[in-house]
Every structure is written in C-alpha cells, then in structure tokens.
Image: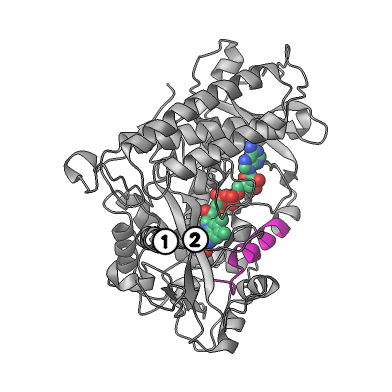
Amino acid sequence: MDNYESDFLVIGSGIAGLCFAIHASRFGTVTIITKKEDSESNTNYAQGGIACVLDDNDSFELHIQDTLTAGRGLCNEGSVRIIVEEGPARIKDLIDWGVDFSHLNAATNPYKLDLGREGGHSVNRIVHARDLTGRAVEEQLVALIRANKSIRLFEHHFAVELITDHHLSGTPGTIGDTCYGAYVLDTISRNIVPVRAEFTCLATGGAGRTYLHTTNPSIATGDGYAMAYRAGADIANMEFIQFHPTTLLHEGAPSFLISEALRGSGAVLCHRSGREFMEKYHPLKSLAPRDVVARAIDNEMKLSGEPCVFLDIRQADATQTEKHFPYIYKRCRDLGLDITRDLIPVVPSAHYTCGGIRVDHEGHAGIDGLYACGEVSCTGVHGANRLASNSLLEALVFSYRAATDAGARLAARSRNSRAAIPAWDDSGTNDNEEWILLSHNKTEIQSVMWDYVGIVRSDLRLSRAMRRITLLEREIENFYKRTRITVPLLELRNLVTTAKLIVLSAAKRRESRGLHFTTDYPGQNDRYWKKDTVLSNK
Ligand SMILES: Cc1cc2nc3c(=O)[nH]c(=O)nc-3n(C[C@H](O)[C@H](O)[C@H](O)COP(=O)(O)OP(=O)(O)OC[C@H]3O[C@@H](n4cnc5c(N)ncnc54)[C@H](O)[C@@H]3O)c2cc1C
C-alpha cells in the first residue's frame, strides 16, 4: 500500500494527466494510475490538432473572438484569454519535449509549423502532426514519463472513489472538504488499495460512451464526473455534448472520425447525388461551427430518409489528400473506400463533453487538494460549444497551471492530515453470476441517451430519459452494493451517474444555446439563461 504513496496522485494518462505529472515532478513525487494501457485515451485518437496563435496573420484577439463566438455567450472570458495567451509557451514545451509536429518550408511563423484550418476558426492556426496529432503527443509524453525518476505509472489501476473526509470519519453521507487521494482497484490482482497523496489530479477524460454512437474509445465512461460528484464537487454545463458531424458510416466497422481538417482542405458535404446543402444553414457552409453542421446533417437525414450524408473531396489533388490525411486515407482504403475517388458516407456521433467538474483558473475543483484538468474539467473555456482543437490546448495550459499551483502549495506544506485512511470495506459483497445484466444495462443507458438526449431534445424526451435513467440507477446501485467490484460494474455505475448529470442539466436549461437544442424552447434566452447550469451533491 505504501508503495503507491506520493506527493501527487494523477488519475488518467491522456494529455492532461501526463502534462500535469511532468510539471508536478519539478516539485515532488508523482504516482499516475490509469485504467488500461498507458496510452489508451481520447488523446491518442485526436487527429486534427491543437489551436494556437503562431502566425503573423493571426492574433490573440482573433482566437479569443472565435472561441467566444462558438461558445454562444457562455464562455468564461478570463479562461479563454488564459488558454489563448499561454498557448504558444505550452506548444513550445511540446516541441522541446520532442513532439514532431508537421513543418512548413516557408518561414511564415516563429516555429515554422504548418498551420491547418478548422471550422469556426477565422484563420489557419491548427498545429498538427499530419492527421495523427494525438498519437504523436501521447507517445512522446509517455516516453518522457517513463524516463522520469520522480514519476511512477501504474497501468491497469482503476480509481474507484476519491478519499474525502467521510471515509476518515466513517460517517457515510458526510461530504468531504478535503481530498486525501483515491481508492484504487488493481484490475489484475483485484485488490482495492487506498492511494494517499497531498494533491490529487483528476484527468479521466470525457463521457462519449454514455451514447450509442461515439468517436470516443472504451475508456470514456465518465468516471471522473461521477467520482467528483459523489465527493461533493460542483458539476457544470453537462448538457453541452458536442456531436462530431462526420464519423464514417460503414457497416461492421467501429465509429471512425473523419477529421474536420478534411473540410478545411476543401471537402464539402453533400447528398448521394452530389447535391450540396450547407448553404441553407450557414454562410461558412461546410466550414460552419460543429453544432450547426451536426444539426444540419441530422435535419437533412430526416428529410431524405437516408442513413447518412456524404463528404466529397474528389475535386482536391489526390496526392495531396493522401499525403495530408494518411491515417484517414488508409483506414477508409482498408474498408474498400478510396476517398480521392469515392464519396465518404458520414453521420454525427457523440464526441466531446464541454461541461464537467467546475474548476477555477488554477484547475482547483473546490475540494481542498483536488484538481481537475482536461476534458473532465469545466474551466469555462468552451461555454455552450467547443471551438475545434481548443480542447487539447485547454488541457495543456490548465494542467500546467494546476501543477504549478499544487507545487507552490506543496512547498508551503499548507495542508493534509496524516490521519489513518481505512482499508476498503467490501464485506457483504459476493461474486455475482448475472454479469450479462450489466451489458444489457449499458446498452439501455446508451440507447436512452441517443434516442432522447441527442442532437435535438424536447421536454417530453428528457422526462422519458429521466424516468428510465433513474430506474436504471437504482438497479445498478443495488447490484453494486451486493457485488464484488469489477471494472464493468464500476464503469456502469459511473456511466449511469454521468447520464443522469447530462439529463438533469439538459432539463434545467429552458432555452436553446450552442450544443443544447430543444424544440420546446427554440430560442436563446439571454435574460434568464446566460449562466452555467450547476449540479451539486452537497
Ligand atoms: C477521435 C477524436 C478526435 C479528436 N480530435 C481532437 C483534435 O483534433 N483537437 C482537439 O483539441 N481535441 C480533439 N479531441 C478531443 C481531445 O482528444 C480530448 O478532449 C482530450 O484528448 C482529452 O484529454 P484528457 O487528458 O482530458 O483525457 P483522455 O485523453 O481521454 O485521457 C483520460 C485518461 O484517464 C484514464 N481513466 C479514465 N477513468 C479512469 C479511472 N476510473 N481510473 C483510472 N484511469 C482512468 C483513461 O484510461 C485515460 O488514460 C478528439 C477526440 C476524439 C475522441
């Protein structure tokens, strides 16, 4: 048990957790736990890149304005300014750490990087490593972590619960003001151990798996939102789920994202006949913000009765397309689709969770000793809609700020008691044989969320969803109390809690804004609703 103890505990090994760990290691010892292999994360699948002002033709004000426009009046302007102005320094960190971004021959910006364009950005500002940006970043960060003597990384370790005051006092129901670490399940040995730390950083990523169709890998089950909610942290703006407009529709193949960068390079949305339709919805046509494009596609599919729409990049130079998008080109080619000659069938799917654990400008989550970074956090940067490629930037900037803040507090030794942390109590639980019920429950949650809490919502749909999710939550909680813990059970419990948070937030917001569109309140209501929806378990 002592083996795991350190100054900082980081839960999650995506860009946010790994960057927090690297920066925190300047101040003390770091333990990272991650529930699967080290690089399995949303980060690893990011294709497009990282938005950053690096070009003479660009400016901080322009990037801030683009972000605020996408966020539909709900961004925290201070947080937006922070990520935009501190972005270049954090990109420089990545370059210094050896991340191999795509370069340009002509020296039009200080780092000579090739800057791509994505929807909602008024100029080219997307730093990328071909169309495999996330993987390039993740691999380099993992290599750095492995070589750092102050950091230990434990794969196949699942954070079950944050340790707060009620675990120490033994009084169930007491909500904690202090976080002492986390109870962690070693998924190989099946032991649950308390991992103590002065400071804990939740970097568990998003919740795409709450929905039936998603671009997110299997790790994205919303564990961090659920754990933080149970521990008493505020959870904000969960109704704002971004649906990526263009994932490949191919029978038998898992959802695969066709990056927005393809539209930045000239691909247009159209019907099977080649007829374009985006001019009906937005002046930027196929480069309109994601929420507009997703709703337009949803509407066109309803009008045509077709299961998808199409992307057409046939008019672009084939060699350039293959060179700039080698990953997409190959994945499609393996499925018998040549994107330089064929139309690409696409549908929207759940992609990014804009809301999350409410944090301040230092990433602090309102419980002493607890920070949250990356997709699981709500810094206020995204407001009602995330601007493409701002999430990796947000993770980079806020993980640095959080680690720096925690480091300063550690130096001042301002906190944490040495009170004994009790062992995990699993008395009264048994191995259950009805595991199949878990996968039924999971599919039910995902279907309810897809059918009733998707791109277009209504009061009727949301109340249907709430009834079903409440029933499922009760069943799952009952199962949890009687059953010896396993990963599928923990994920299911977190999934249903996260689904509930999304439905509750969506039901609260009686207007349509950004990613939240409801037919009962189709207009934006600034008078009453220019504010965050906040949920608390306190
Ligand atoms: C297909 C795809 C493409 C994208 N493209 C872009 C892009 O081009 N630009 C951009 O800015 N953003 C993009 N995004 C979004 C971006 O990738 C994510 O928001 C970002 O990577 C999140 O980083 P993170 O570190 O917060 O979480 P993640 O990278 O998801 O990492 C979360 C980590 O937490 C671990 N974890 C979760 N729960 C537990 C638990 N209970 N115990 C222990 N460990 C746990 C996971 O295993 C994982 O290691 C994309 C997302 C997807 C899915």
- Position above or below: 205 against 313: above
Q: Is residue 524 left or right of residue 200?
A: left
Residue nearest the viewer, comparing 365 with 43: 43
Does any portion of residue 159 appear in the rendered image?
Answer: no
Q: Is residue 138 magenta?
A: yes
Q: Position of residue 382 (x, y in %)?
A: 38, 52
Q: Which residues are magenta?
A: 128-143
* Residue 130 in the image, given as x and y percentages of width and height: 59, 75
Residue assigned mark 2: 307
- The count of marks equals 2
Does ligand 1 reach within 8 Å of label 1's beta carbon?
Answer: no
**SS state under label 2:** loop
Residues at marks 2 and 1 touching, judged by CB atoms closer than 8 Å: yes
Under 8 Å from ligand 1: the CB of mark 2? no
Task: Specify whether residue 118 is painted magenta.
Answer: no
Residue at figure coordinates x 65%, y 21% from the top left = 479
Tell me if mark 1 has few (under 14), some (14-19) or many (20+) residues whose alpha carbon lies within 10 angstroms of its own.
Answer: some
Q: Which residue is mark 1?
A: 301
Q: CA distance from mark 2 to mark 1?
A: 6 Å
Helix, strand, or loop for circle 1? helix
| Mark nearer the N terminus (2 vs 1) | 1
**Residue 485 lies in quadrant:** top right
* Amino acid type indicated by mark 2: Pro
Most extreme residue toward the front is: 305
